Image (cartoon, grey):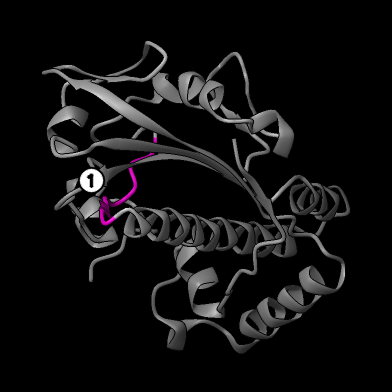
């Protein structure tokens, strides 16, 4: 069960602004842009990001109409996931986190009466998780390619194809505790800036853009973070 740490992440002010729901950078006050750059520098200097990935790749033993059966009698249930990954031979399961330090700093800013810094730092954290997720997908795609296969686009709990209730199951399939990730009794992943995902591995795997995922989401008309292109 591989665990990877110290993954380099690429963060831009544009991604941070998108994660803040601020679409047009030209409309953002210069003060905000300066503060974002300042916070990005402080995040790097204080080592607030501790990116880590725990993942495992399982052989798929059977794909039925409503579930994927994996080696070791493991099962992931959903009516849509089997159709999305119908050609998959293997299933990659991964959990990613940037660790708890950045979240602790957000709490500190809030308690000190600095809500703007807390809000912008939260956006930096979300952008960092997005970047870490992309690095995870590249890692799994590279392993698929080494076998002569392709990797599908990622699917996370809560997206069409994977119910949020499967979050517990996914964290059991990888050494999530080794990177400090767990799930609360209410189904929330912790640390908060963490994400789990699955990817199919096989010939001619289905792929979709982030914009296409947003287009299928029931919040597509109201979500300030959506991607349209």
**Residue tagged by mark 1?**
202
Q: Residue at x 73, y 34 (%)?
A: 178
- Describe residue 177's horizontal placement relative to residue 127 as left or right: right
Residue 219 makes an appearance in the image: yes
Residue 202 figure quarter: top left
Depth check: give the residue in front, 1 or 36: 1
Depth check: give the residue in front, 203 or 132: 203
Say few, some or many: other residues with alpha carbon within 10 Å of mark 1 (under 14 / 14 to 19 / 20 or more).
Answer: many
Residue 38 figure quarter: bottom right
Image quarter hosting the N terminus: top right
The answer to whether 155 is drawn above or below residue 206 in the figure is: above
Q: Residue at x 80, y 50 (%)?
A: 101
- Describe residue 13's horizontal placement relative to residue 88 as left or right: right
State the count of labels: 1
Image quarter hosting the C terminus: bottom left
Q: Give the structural element (helix, strand or loop) at label 1.
A: strand
Q: Residue 97: image x %, image y %?
A: 63, 46
* Magenta span: chief secondary structure: loop
- Describe residue 224's horizontal placement relative to residue 216 as left or right: right
The answer to whether 208 is drawn above or below residue 120 in the figure is: above
Looking at the image, the residue that sits furthest to the top is: 73
Depth check: give the residue in front, 185 or 54: 54
Q: Residue at x 14, y 53 (%)?
A: 204
Depth check: give the residue in front, 200 or 224: 200
Residue 221 makes an appearance in the image: no
The magenta stretch spans residue 94: no
Looking at the image, the residue that sits furthest to the front is: 147
The answer to whether 125 is drawn above or below residue 71 in the figure is: below
Q: Residue 162: image x %, image y %?
A: 30, 29
Q: Residue 3: image x %, image y %?
A: 65, 44
Residue extent of the magenta highlight: 148-156
Q: Residue at x 68, y 85 (%)?
A: 34
């Amino acid at each position: 069960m591989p665990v990877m740490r110290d993954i380099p992440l690429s963060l831009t002010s544009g991604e941070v602004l998108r994660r803040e729901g601020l679409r047009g950078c030209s409309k953002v006050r210069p003060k905000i842009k300066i503060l974002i750059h300042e916070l990005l520098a402080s995040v790097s200097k204080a080592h607030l990001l501790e990116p880590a990935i725990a993942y495992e790749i399982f052989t798929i033993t059977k794909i039925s109409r409503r579930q994927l059966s994996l080696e070791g009698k493991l099962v992931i249930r959903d009516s849509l996931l089997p159709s999305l990954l119908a050609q998959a031979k293997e299933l990659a399961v991964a959990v990613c986190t940037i660790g708890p330090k950045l979240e602790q700093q957000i709490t500190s800013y809030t308690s000190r009466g600095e809500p703007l810094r807390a809000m912008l730092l939260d956006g930096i954290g979300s952008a960092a998780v997005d970047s870490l997720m992309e690095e995870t997908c590249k890692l799994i795609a590279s392993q698929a390619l080494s076998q002569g296969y392709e990797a599908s686009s990622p699917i996370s709990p809560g997206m069409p194809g994977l119910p949020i209730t499967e979050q517990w199951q996914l964290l059991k399939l990888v050494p999530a505790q080794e990177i400090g990730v767990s799930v609360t009794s209410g189904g929330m992943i912790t640390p908060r800036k963490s994400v789990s995902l699955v990817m199919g591995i096989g010939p001619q795997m289905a792929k979709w853009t982030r914009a296409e995922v947003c287009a299928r989401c029931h919040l597509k008309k109201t979500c300030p973070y959506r991607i349209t292109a």
